[in-house]
Image: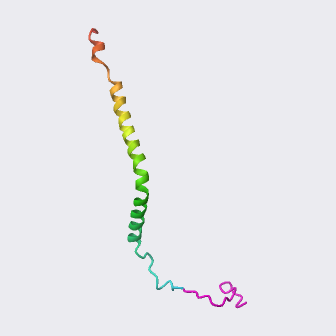
Amino acid sequence: MGHLKFGNLAFIRNVIYIRLSPYEQKAFPNYLQNTWNGFRRDFNNVFPYAAPPLLASYLLYTWGNQENERASRKNPADYVNDE
């Protein structure tokens, strides 16, 4: 069964484990590049599906605000005979 320590509970033949020392690894390897690539990849995958509803919502919102402003205006002809 191998050594009875926590890290060595079983001995398995024909299995190769490759480990790097923490002293040989970079703390943040290519962090900004990976972040940019992830953003670009997500944007390219999501944009075709998200853009049409967002554009339609924006246009509906602006049209609604303009229509509300137009309907809220007073008609000057209604107040011609008032003093």
> Image quadrant of residue 39?
bottom left
**Left or right: 33 as drawn, with respect to 77:** right
Above/below status of 76 relative to 33? above
**Left or right: 70 as drawn, with respect to 34:** left
Instruction: Check if residue 72 falls in the magenta segment.
Output: no
The residue lying at 35 percent from left, 25 percent from top is: 71
Instruction: Check if residue 4 falls in the magenta segment.
Output: yes
Quadrant of the frame with the C terminus: top left
Above/below status of 60 relative to 54? above
Above/below status of 30 relative to 51? below
Q: Nearer the viewer, residue 4 or 37?
A: 37
Q: What span is in magenta?
A: 1-18
Q: Position of residue 46 (x, y in %)?
A: 43, 56
> Image quadrant of residue 42?
bottom left
> Image quadrant of residue 5?
bottom right
Q: Nearer the viewer, residue 53 or 67?
A: 53
